[in-house]
Amino acid sequence: MTQAALSPGMTIDGAAVPAGATIDVVDPATGAVFAQAPDCSREQLDAAFAAATAAFGTWRRDDDTRRTALRACAAALVARAADIGAVLTAEQGKPIADAVREVYTGAAWLNYYADLDLPREIIQDDDKGIVEVVRRPIGTVAAITPWNYPLTLAFWKIAPALRAGNTVVIKPSPYTPLSTLLVGEILRDVLPAGVLNTVSGGDELGAWMTGHPLARKISFTGSVATGKHVAASAAPDLKRVTLELGGNDAAIILDDAEVAAIATKIFWSAFQNNGQVCAAVKRVYVPENLHDDLVDALAEQAKAVRVGAGTTEGVQLGPVNNKPQYERVGSLVADALAGGATAVAGGQPLEVGDGGGYFFQPTILAGLADGTRIVDEEQFGPALPVVAYRDLEATVEHVNNGRFGLGGSVWSGDADRAAEVAARLDVGTAWVNTHLALGPGQPFGGAKWSGIGVENGPWGLHGFTELKVLHRAR
Ligand code: NAD
């Protein structure tokens, strides 16, 4: 990886802008600062929104130009997948293969939306007139992303926003700014100036964006707490908002499930990306008759995982992305252990290399109940609580009574029986005998505190449009 790739700059109005101030970027595998990213000033942010708003007038006009441009973006990203993946691993921690996969996911989303039509519907055509319902773009989008999947989640926004004819100012998390900035550099030569502007800085920059008078739509992915600030900030100006927030997904095992058939799937549904997935399995409810077998099978998986720096060949899980999150996972595990839970696997930080990185042992916790923090809260890390239950109805009711409603899954030898239970979960996505199965055509969003609106599929595209009626009298 070149030093240039490690210090990408912001892209505003199609050009590089010099950084006045900078923020440090830490390698989570060592805990050491390895790069700086620009700390966008208010004036630079104003310039980004002004450029996006100016570009909107032309960009919104031609459908075919946009389709072609999106496909060109996908090709440009794939051509630089190895470089982008290396930067993403350096700042995020995930294994290189997973980081490179994010680039391909971004390209897949761009191509999917390039192919998707924007509907025009004639609802009346008679002697009185023609009434057509069309979807028009909203304007300049403020897009804000978290640190767990910086590129995947960026393209869940960029692809449909641009396809619909909007322009974008995007800000990645301060923990993972570089990969998005590098994408901005690569796409400078592909997109017209001002269509995609990439800025970086701290949390305050996000707040400036959501309050910016030129932002007409906010597309936000992050925590529930920040999502509420974003909604409040959007309200005075009636900005349109999509919020993709946190989750505490339950996997509910039915009493006829075959442990050997489901344990590996459940394990990776919980530990993919080190558990730092909004819709990961974050707690398992298992009937008493299967409890010990499932706990043993999950523990066996956890002990076999290869944890290390994302740059090390063969590593399956990297470090937790940042120090506050690493400390939070540790404190939730310690709280459970102090309350009488058993760590059947893991339970401790893990020393890798010189010991400065944010590594934590993949942890399976048993012998705990609802009311324990790690069961009731979102841990967002490599520790999974397994809770034994007797009464399925009470368990479904308990899960539905929580504030989160992102996803959930039901596991059984009888898929129809599981589907009946899944149908009763108050969530955005209910899976049967799988979890985290997602695709560009499938809408993704949360019920209750897990979000407002959806991303992906035609529904995600519609979120970047507003309905408009064209009524022609005869
Ligand atoms: P976070 O809310 O701390 O930060 C997310 C982004 O918001 C960052 O870019 C941050 O700089 C910015 N931000 C912070 N304060 C802001 C403010 N006042 N106004 C505007 N922007 C602000 O979340 P995080 O810790 O980066 O990410 C983890 C959370 O994201 C978890 O809760 C996870 O479940 C959630 N998440 C949800 C989805 C989903 O699609 N539903 C996907 C991934 C992650």
Image (cartoon, rainbow, N blue to C red):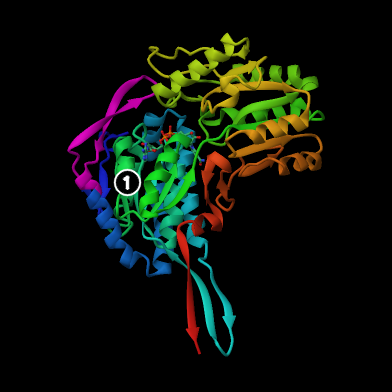
Amino acid type indicated by mark 1: Met
Total tally of numbered discs in the picture: 1
Decide: few, some or many residues near mark 1? Use Cα within 10 Å; few <14, some 14-19, many ≥20: many
Q: Name the residue nearer the viewer: 104 or 230.
A: 230
Whether residue 236 is visible, yes or no, is yes
Taking depth in this image into account, of 229 and 14 the one nearest to the observer is 229
Residue 154 seen in render: no
Quadrant of the image occupied by residue 401: top right
The residue drawn where x is 39% and y is 35% is: 88
Ligand 1 within 8 angstroms of badge 1 C-beta = yes
Could you tell me which residue is drawn at 77 percent across and 32 percent down?
393
- Where in the figure is residue 39, as x and y percent of width and height? 24, 37
Q: Quadrant of residue 285?
A: top right
Measured along the vertical axis of the image, is residue 97 above or below residue 338?
A: below
| Above/below status of 169 relative to 255 | below
Q: Residue at x 57, y 22 (%)?
A: 374
Q: Quadrant of ligand 1?
A: top left
Residue 328 falls inside the magenta stretch: no
* Residue extending furthest toward the front: 236
| Residue position for label 1 | 209
Q: Is residue 56 left or right of residue 74?
A: left
Q: Quadrant of the N terminus?
A: top left
List x then y, in percent, for residue 209: 32, 46
Please provide percent x and percent y for residue 16.
22, 47
Q: Residue at x 21, y 46 (%)?
A: 44
- On screen, 436 above or below 286? below
Start-end of magenta stretch: 17-45
The local secondary structure at tag 1 comes to helix
Q: Quadrant of residue 430?
A: top right
Q: Position of residue 269 (x, y in %)?
A: 61, 32
